[in-house]
Image: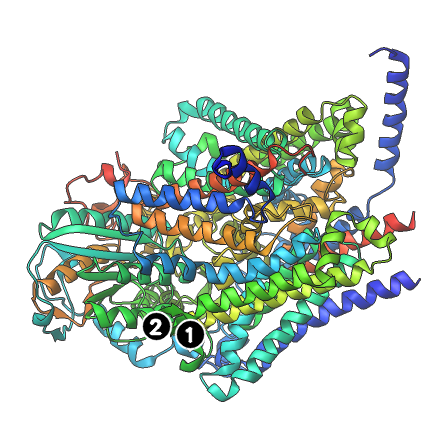
Amino acid sequence: MANVTVQSEKEVSWLRQAWARIRKIHPVFPVFLIVFLAVGYLNPKFIEPNGILIFLRRAAPLGILAVGQLFVLAAGGFDLSVGSQVTFVVIGGALLINNDPEKLTYTLLVLYGIGILVGLINGLVVTFMKVPSFIATLGMLLALKGAGLYWTGGAPRGYLTDNFRQFGRGFLEPVPVVERFPIAVVVLIVVVAIAAYIFHFTIFGRQILAVGDNPVAAKLSGINVRRVRILTFIVSALCAITAGILEGGFGGVNIIAGDGLELQAISAAVLGGAVLLGGRGAVLAAAAGALTLEALFNFLNLIGQPEGVRDVVQGLIIIGAVAYAAINARRR
Amino acid sequence: MTALSLENIQKRLRTSRIPPVYLMLVAILVVSLVLDQIYGRGQMIDPTILTNILVRSVALGIVAIGQTFVMIAASIDLSVAYLISVTAVMSSFLMQGDPARVPMAVAVVFGIGALVGLVNGLIITKLKVNAFIATLGTGLILKGALNASFSNFTGAVPESFQTLGYGRWGPVPISIIVLFAIAIVAGFVLYRTKFGAHLYGIGGNEVVARLSGLRTDRVVIIAHIVCSMSAVMTGLFVVSRLRSGAPWIGPDGLYDLESIAAVVVGGTALSGGVGSVAGTLAGVVIFGILDTAFNQLGVDTFLKSVLRGAIIILAVASYTIRSRREAS
Amino acid sequence: MLLKKKLYLLLSVVVVLAFVLAACGGTEAPAVDEPAVEEPAAEEPAAEEPMEEEEPMEEEPAEEMVEPAENILAGENAAIAPEFFDQEALDQEVAWIDAVPEGPEDMVWEQYIDPEWVDTTEYAKDGPYTICFSNAGVNNPWRVVGFNTMEHQVALETDIGEWIHVDAEGSDEKQIADIEDLLASGNCDGMIISPNTTAALTPIVEQACEQLPVVVFDRGVFTDCPVSFVRPIGGYAFGHLGAEFIVDNLPDGGNVLAFRILPGVDVLENRWAAAKVVFENNPQITVIGVEFTEGDNARTKAIVEDHLDRFGQIDAIWMDAGATAVAAIEAFEDAGLDIPIMVGEDQQDFLKKWQDEGLTAVAPTFPTFQWRTAVIAMVNILQGEQVPAWWVLPQPPVTADNLDSLVNASMPPLHYAMCGCEGMPGFPEDWGGQ
């Protein structure tokens, strides 16, 4: 804080850089467009406004998870526990709200409280106990899934009430042009907007990239590396809780709601250009990565491909995306 | 005798080559036995049950040894679970219960394993794709290929092949002998060959290793081939116990994440350069002890998962907490 | 440039690997890919029907985009491996649907159909017994309800001194090791096994049979060494019943969307096999999709949305398990459409929806009361009383007639109504009810 002008100059130049980065279109956007139009060609209903909204509603949880995951990845970590967090929200939410619509606020507060706690524990274990985040969040994945089921006795109890489910299932009505607008899409837009602001336009965002790029250098330049990393895990957890609320709203109570979402979220973020082991990433691109994956699944469903092909394509695409990025980086 | 002073013992422990995970192993075993005496039926001390702990650990143990190789080189392999499924399904499909077809089937699955390892290694070294993503990707490809072509248990392994899983040599299950044989060979390769030394070198500092003239890419690729081969061996062992293979046995056994967890609990650093086969074995056996102890104590299924997660974290934390480096 | 060449080379290696694997399976695996029930080029008459359901009252030009519904019974997901199709067993089970079970009238879990009695005097022992149970896992709500019911049955049995239960958490390897431990401990007077997968558990069950009386339930094993195999009528009856209901309620035919959880589980494969036969025999029914949900609600909902987009109309939904039935219904609600004819299962959330919305529906069951029966069978064996070698339990469906008696709003959403547990001490709290 000694030299304010330098600080703000830095900020301005960083802003400019960020803009430059956003304007230099990431390849995930054209890829998304191609897949999206391919689906639209096969199913014209898909690219009508309503079709797009239905698609976005379905993709919202993964998009939010990918954005949360981006924060952790950019700081050089992993968060494998998000899938379990989603499941935890769905079954824990049903137990907490217990068919009583009036408990909505209470339930949401408790869930977000648990989310912050989980993120905090992940962060503390990684920064203070120095357990690699892969292992720390893997342990959390096991523990949280078990804890959720232990809490409810193995099967979900209670129903999620309609006012809880509206976030994932409901529509805003009436809305001009499209008549009804899914609330989940509103949530997605808000989360992406807030995350993009934090990630690209605040000191914290810059610090995340610095920590991910080189933690030692970041520390030497006066960044509180531990605090930054803990905060990234908390951001990821908050996103996971939000995604869980949408997922539970969309699908209802289910004990496998979040299974495998962690790897999909990482794939999506990587597809959007996030680099494992940190230092690079963009929020919009991560969200676009999630939409691309989801559109791709849709495409494969439409051309009637069996289950297996879907996995093969997903595998090839994430390898291809990272290889492309790595080769590009080398060329520079 | 001063040799027995606490300080001396500490010093000896520190200088000895016994990985610290063995202390943890002994501690967990003793705690389990004591808890079993107090709250359980006190049968865990029974030799058959103790032997069974090892038998439980064989499948995970073999693949974890392979995983140790890639992790020492600072890589990782998430595709092993599906490779185990591919091996189990392909081998029982190719054998069709006919002993004469065993050598052919084994050769084919090892061929597949070598190919998968080669592809993993090439993607990681030549395309510079992060190992996590690369092997996640190849794992998905294997899964997809498998699900598109097999949906269930197909064929069977012949009776004679099941000796591998159920046979005994005197009182000792053959499976345990196999595990230890593989461990000894792996230990020899790691500690006594150039390849092993190169692995540690690359894991410690890849740039330095490359500058000192090492063909790092080739070493990493070979490590991945070794790891895939070990997954194939686990697949063969599993199918010998299950008689025939289904596509879901690899992922259902959680061999990917559990093998990584066992290796890390065994003292191998995720960042590479440090690790041992003996440590990995201890890590795997710890998982086996936990399984058995939970059963003997009648621990609630869901609580088991919570405890397992917590123990993995704490075990790893017990080494890392004193390190000066920031974790990744 | 060199770099690019390498990239292409490597990517093509990956692709080739993938396709070699797929091809190996595809061409060399007649055992899997050539379902016994269908011709390879299955363009059956039903498939050609363009199925234009252009009802004038319905929808705008968008209807043009709707794909003509094609019967996809020959499709990949519809295929049934031959080991899961046995015409004789199908006929037997269908016949059992209408059979009148023997046994105590008010205790359906002690009833049996066509018993072939086994003498068990050789196993007779004085109590109290130590009974061991190797459970495949409690990884879904059906198993949770069943296991709960089972533990309460154990509490009711005065002859059981000790109950040792181990849980394999859904892993074959673990279950084998668990059974080995139980056998080694020498504690067990008898063993109940609920196998994780049929084929994989067969060798170890054979070993257990050599040492003790064994009762197997739920999924079977490929050996008849267990003293008794407790099972409801079976998967064929389950699938047949639902499919017949759809055919009966769609006299003029229509589009059916079939949902399956996952391939390869015998009890589930049998359900689809039987339904498929029914649909094939009724060409007026067009199966527009056979999709795997893996039990995931969100996925189910998405599949319904996609099929509504593609085909415009779905007249009935058939499911091999009902956990995601309500999610499927919600997809119709969200789209503002009428709920079609539904085949669900006896989960409370579905039954409640059925009652609230007055659906045209049926719910075949795979009753959880079989978990009770397994304990009863084991105790009978140890007491030296005869038991049926195949203890075939009735499999009463939920229909419009008995729906009201089975709905219980105070129970959890995924509680299975056909649990035979209502009269047990501790009901409903111990099952999560209020």
Quarter of the picture containing the N terminus of chain C is bottom right
Label 2: few (<14), some (14–19) or many (≥20) C-alpha neighbours in 10 Å: some
Is C244 left, or right, of C17 in this rendering? left
Q: Position of residue C144 (x, y in %)?
A: 32, 48
Q: Relative to C43, is C299 above or below?
A: above
Tell which of B281 and B314 is nearer to you.
B281
Is C191 left, or right, of A124 in this rendering? left
Looking at the rendered structure, the kind of residue marked 2 is: Pro
Q: Position of residue C282 (x, y in %)?
A: 40, 74
Tell which of C216 and B326 is nearer to you.
B326
- Please determine if labels 2 and 1 lie on a single subunit: no
Q: Residue at x 24, y 48 (%)?
A: B41
Q: Which residue is mark 2?
A: C203
Q: In which chain is the residue bearing label 2?
A: C
| 2 and 1 marks in contact (CB < 8 Å) | yes
Looking at the rendered structure, the kind of residue marked 1 is: Arg
Q: In which chain is the residue bearing label 1?
A: B
Q: Position of residue A79 (x, y in %)?
A: 61, 40
Task: Check disc 1 and report its element: helix, strand or loop.
Answer: loop
Q: Position of residue A258 (x, y in %)?
A: 52, 44
> Among all residues in the image, which is located at the extreme front?
B1
User: Can residue B243 be seen in the rendering of this structure?
Assistant: yes
Q: Relative to C260, is B298 above or below?
A: above
Q: Which residue is mark 1?
A: B243
User: Can residue C289 be seen in the rendering of this structure?
Assistant: no
